[in-house]
Amino acid sequence: MGYDDVIKYLGEFGRYQRRIHLLLCFPTIVCAFHKLAGVFLLALPNFRCQLPFEKGETVQFSSLPQEKWSLAYPVDGVTGKLSTCKYYNVAYNEDYLNGSEPFTQNGTLECSSRYLYDQSRYLSSAVSEWDLVCNRSLMSATSDSLFMVGVLFGSFVFGQMSDRVGRKPTFFAALVIQVVFGILVGMAPEYFSYTIGRMVVGATTSGFFLVAYVIAMEMVGSSKRLYAGVFMQMFFSVGFMLTAAFAYFIRDWRWLQIALSLPGLLFLCYYWLIPESARWLLSKGRQDEAFVIIRKAAKVNKVEIPSEIYEQLVEEVAEKKKQAELDASKPVPSVLDLLRYPNLRRKTLLIFFDWFVNATVYYGLSWNTNNLGGNQLLNFVITGAVEIPGYTFLLFTLNRCGRRTILCGAMVVSGVSLLLTIIVPRDMNWLIIVCAMVGKMAITSSYGTVYIFSSEQFPTVVRNVGLGTSSMVARVGGIIAPYLKLLGEIWQPLPLIICGALSLTAGLLSLLLPETHNKPMLETIEDGENFGKKRQASVVAEEGGEEMKNMLNGRSN
């Protein structure tokens, strides 16, 4: 008798579980605020160097008509656009500015005064306040990258904390730190304190979101976890879109950051609404507290749990404690166990690559909306909106078509749609946006599949180690992703092409992994090494071809 059997008596997704699950979905909205805020906090407005003849602090971006820019700023040899980081070394008198040809014989000078920014779209951003442009533009991407370093660090710290002191204390510790540092970021006096503050906020998003996710999933029956998990991810997508609404009304980055942080205060009331995880309490031998929660759930769900069930749970906890003492003397599983055997190593490296690509492409596309052209806010909203059909697609297909088919198909579709931007004419910017959104929708489906697929590939004895390492590899992809948007300044489709190439490659390589749908869970290292070992290359190619054929037929229908 285990806790999963108790859930069968309670109902796999009864009224009590639905209520708590819905409450825990709302914090994911705030996590989305912080993860996507960098798009607007570090927005790059149009800018130009203040020219020598423009005196005083009252000079504005629009003071020099754009038709005169070619007389002041040279053409960048890489982008083919005017480089407003430099200016021609000439005397900017009235006769020169009334001419039509630039004087280039004296060369150019680097901007040494100050930069002027277009305030028609953003009143201010961290980029415009601290001049993170030209030779300092890398600092903008580095700030977002260090935010993801914080996410990686937080997954370790808050993950360990939730296992030691409990899910509920960890949830509220992360919440309080997130609100405090979120407000402090909005008051940061300079770049380095801003970046450190954002890094701390990034760490709390792991504690806040992951712990809420764990509490919600631990009280749901196994047959309902897919639906509960996907529904929770949809709230993240809602938060994604709402971030643009805040940015629309609040055009100053400091007030925007504070406004995105304050909603976290609403969740302090959860202290009286959200229970500790009964599963965690049982694992720590705190049966009486767990039984109080189980009885309350049974009362709300209007079911009765026989008294002998509680007695069996007490006996099971005692047995698990003895087993844990015996296991303490055994070697601790490590990632080296996954890399020691050839077949298991091959599958593990493929899974790691899938995680890396999914994170890189997902965040690369999410943070690249300002480079797509057109209405930046609208692009951002659509980028979040397409996630919802991406997740909905999984509800109808993941348990029918198989994990590998969905993972491979989604990444291939994403890769192909992004690579098509190479051939899109410049005057059809709307088509580039369409291709990017199809790619984002497909990679969302892929990202939602890879966790389930990976958990079924790793044997039980090293499953936590495998998933933990996979998640760490994904964070590395997230750390790299902010630098992709800088490439969009060189050539608009370049970030999309890189993401497309990665996605297409990973999708095709995923055909080398064995299908896990309706297969028994792997228990031992030997099971993991033998699973899929006898599959010949010709069989893989044949099945892969069938999967692609079925996928294309499904699309045509």
Image (cartoon, rainbow, N blue to C red):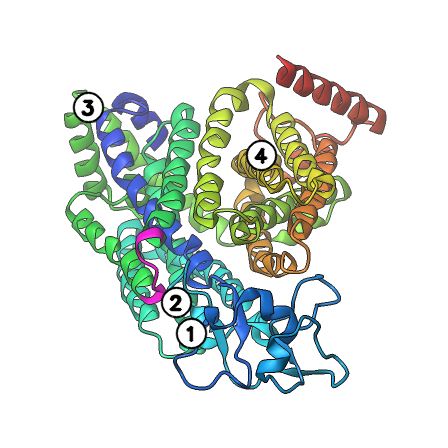
Q: Quadrant of residue 77?
A: bottom right
Of residues 179 and 88, the one drawn nearer to the viewer in this rendering: 88
Q: What residue is pinned by disc 3? A: 301
Task: Work out whether mark 4 precedes mark 1 in sequence or the reverse, and give the earlier one.
Answer: 1
Q: Of circles 2 and 3, which is in front?
A: 2
Q: Residue at x 74, y 64 (%)?
A: 78
Closest to the observer, 371 or 213: 371
How far apart marks 2 and 3 lie (CA) works out to: 52 Å
Residue 254 is situated, as x and y percent measured from the top left of the image, at 33, 67
Looking at the rendering, in which quadrant would you find the N terminus?
top left
Are dots 4 and 3 in contact, CB under 8 Å? no
The residue that label 4 is drawn on is 438
Residue 410's mark? Answer: none
SS for dot 2? loop
**Which residue was labeled with disc 2?**
124
Q: For numbered disc 4, what is the local secondary structure? A: helix
CA–CA distance in space, label 4 to label 2: 31 Å
Q: Is residue 114 magenta?
A: no
Q: Which residues are magenta?
A: 248-254
Which quadrant does the C terminus fall into?
top right
